[in-house]
Image (cartoon, coloured by chain):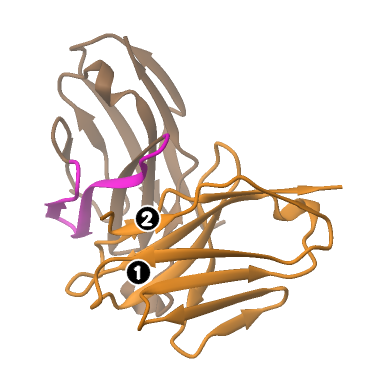
Chain colours: A brown, B orange
Amino acid sequence: EAQVTQNPRYLITVTGKKLTVTCSQNMNHEYMSWYRQDPGLGLRQIYYSMNVEVTDKGDVPEGYKVSRKEKRNFPLILESPSPNQTSLYFCASSSPGQGTHEQYFGPGTRLTVT
Amino acid sequence: RKEVEQDPGPFNVPEGATVAFNCTYSNSASQSFFWYRQDCRKEPKLLMSVYSSGNEDGRFTAQLNRASQYISLLIRDSKLSDSATYLCVVRPPGGYQKVTFGTGTKLQVIP
């Protein structure tokens, strides 16, 4: 089954404790992105990657890091989480070859930083 | 002005009704437009792309008005299962990956 998986799905952590949210897709997509979704602000892009070892900042990259060492994986790293990073996070993948430009989203990770 | 603006709603409509949402965008050079659907606390899913000539998929019709810089989504014969948040998505020129999501319009279809 074609899918994007994220782990963990729910995470409660404390300020300053480094964490990683994993994202993996099995569709051989070149493009992957991370978004955060907050009430009243919608989905905002954090980082995106156009292929292995190619990443770039989205609209709200501060406080986040990413890496793309393999095509299928695109982890999101919070080196020192803060309460303002409490949010719902989505990973997405897509392929320019598809023509529709459809993004496939993972199920989301709900992060709470206390 | 926000890059992409939507009326947050909620739009409460009876089953069988026709409902329309608009979405305005600020960058006149924007190239691609989409409607995504998001059920409560779940991931967004592509509903339909929006083409310049307008397009239809069953009960759903999407239209683009470049002169006035808005896209619309029309849902005919609303079903209870149409209850969701509808996200407008705009791709500006110059980047496949860079898209802007609207904050969404919430639709509640009532029995």
Question: With A91 as the anchor, is A65 left or right in this view?
Answer: left
Q: Chain letter for mark 2, please.
A: B
> Are there few (<14), some (14-19), or many (20+) residues within 10 Å of tag 2?
many
- Residue occupied by mark 1: A95
Indicate the position of residue A7 as horizontal and vertical percent values.
41, 32
In the depicted structure, whether residue A31 falls above or below residue A36: below
In the depicted structure, whether residue B76 falls above or below residue A37: below
Please tell me in which quadrant of the rendered image residue B62 appears. bottom right
Indicate the position of residue B5 as horizontal and vertical percent values.
38, 56
Indicate the position of residue B74 as horizontal and vertical percent values.
63, 70
- Residue occupied by mark 2: B101
Indicate the position of residue A93 as horizontal and vertical percent values.
36, 57
Distance of mark 1 from mark 2, alpha carbons? 18 Å
**B88 and B20: which is toward the camera:** B20
Q: Residue at x 36, y 82 (%)?
A: B66
Q: Residue at x 55, y 36 (%)?
A: B41
Question: With A22 as the anchor, is B84 left or right in this view?
Answer: right
Three-letter code, disc 2: Phe
* Label at residue B110: none
Please tell me in which quadrant of the rendered image residue A94 appears. bottom left
The answer to whether one can see residue A73 in this image is no
The answer to whether one can see residue B32 in this image is yes
